[in-house]
Image (cartoon, grey):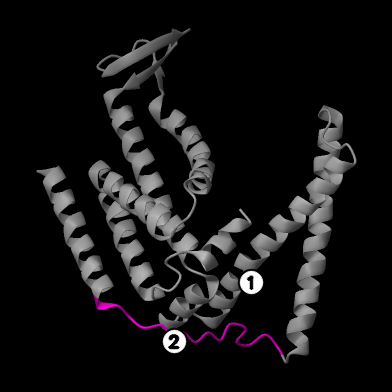
Amino acid sequence: MIKIDDYAYTSGLKDVHPVEKVSFALIFLFFTIISKNISVACFTFTVMSILVIFKAKIPYIAYLKLLFVPFVFLLTSLVAILFSIAPIYQEDLEVLWMAEIGLWQIYISSYSIQQSYELATTILASVSCLYFLVLSTPLNQFIWVLKKVKLPTVFVELMGLTYRFIFVLLEKMNEIYIAQSSRLGYQNYSSWFYSVAQLIVSLFVKSMLSAKQLQIAIDSRGGDEHLYDVDLSMGYNRGHFVIIFISFVTLFMIYVMSKS
C-alpha cells in the first residue's frame, strides 16, 4: 500500500490536468452506481483497468494485488446475498439449489444470483474508478480540485493530513513488523498474539508522537491556516474533453440498449 503514493507521482497520467481525470472517472462512477447495470459496470471496469495498466503504466501485478483487497471483503457480502434461509414448509420459491437442515432450508435462487452479479460488478467497477484516480493523481492535484469546488478549508486540510498519515502509519507498521520478525516474533500462536499486541501498542504510541510533532511544526510556522496552498500551471486538453463527452454518450447508450 505504501507504493500507491509512488505510483501516483510516477504515473504516465500525472501530467494530465486533474479536472479532466476527475471528470472522466466521476462520469463512469456515476453511471455505474446509479444504473447498477452489469453491462455498464463491465465496460467501466474494462476501460479503467486498461487506462491504469497501459496509460498510467502501473504494473498489472500491483493492480491485481490492489483489486484483491476489496475482492476479499466482497466475497463475504456475496455469501450473505447468495444464500437464503427459509422454513422448510415454505413454498413458491424459485430454487436452483437447496439443502435442508432440520426445520430450515438453505437455498440459492435465480434472484439472489442476479443480485450477486450486480453487486460484484458494481463494486469492482466503482473500485476501479477510484484506483484510476488514486494511481494517476498526486495529492497536490487532488487538493487543488477540492479547493476549486469550494470545499471548506478544514475538510481539505483534514483530508490531506489523513492521506499522509495513512502512509506514515503503514511505514511505521512495516518497520515494527520487520523488527519483531528479526527477533523471532510470529513463530507460533502464542508469540503471534503477543507480537500483534505489541505492534498495536507501539503503533498507537508512534502515531501519537507523530501527531504531536506535526502540531508543533504547524504551530512553529504560525498556525494551521492554509496548510495546502496549491497552484497548478497545467493546461487543459480539448481532446480529453471530447473523450469525456464520448464516454458519457457511450455509457448512456450502453445503459439504454441493455434496458431495451
Q: Which residues are magenta?
A: 223-238
Q: Earlier in the sequence, mark 2 or mark 1?
A: 1
> At x 83% / y 51%, what residue is drawn?
201
Q: Label 1: how many residues lie within 10 Å, few (<14), some (14-19) or many (20+)?
A: some
User: Which label belongs to residue 161?
Assistant: 1
Q: Residues within 10 Å of mark 2 (few under 14, many from 20)?
A: few
Check the picture and name the quadrant holding the C terminus.
Answer: top left
114 over 48 or under it: above or below: above
Farthest residue to the bottom: give it.
Answer: 222
Q: Residue 117: x and y, percent?
A: 33, 35
Rendered residue at 29%/16% (across/down): 95
Is residue 240 part of the magenta span, yes or no?
no
Q: Nearer the viewer, mark 2 or mark 1?
A: 2
Examine the rendering and report whether any part of residue 36 can be seen: no
Q: Amino acid at mark 2?
A: Ser
Helix, strand or loop at mark 1: helix
Q: Return the residue nearer the eye: 117 or 110.
A: 117
Identity of the amino acid at label 1?
Answer: Leu
Indicate the secondary structure of the residue bearing disc 2: loop
| Residue identifier under label 2 | 233
Q: Nearer the viewer, residue 7 or 93?
A: 7
In the depicted view, which residue is nearer to us: 88 or 67?
Answer: 67
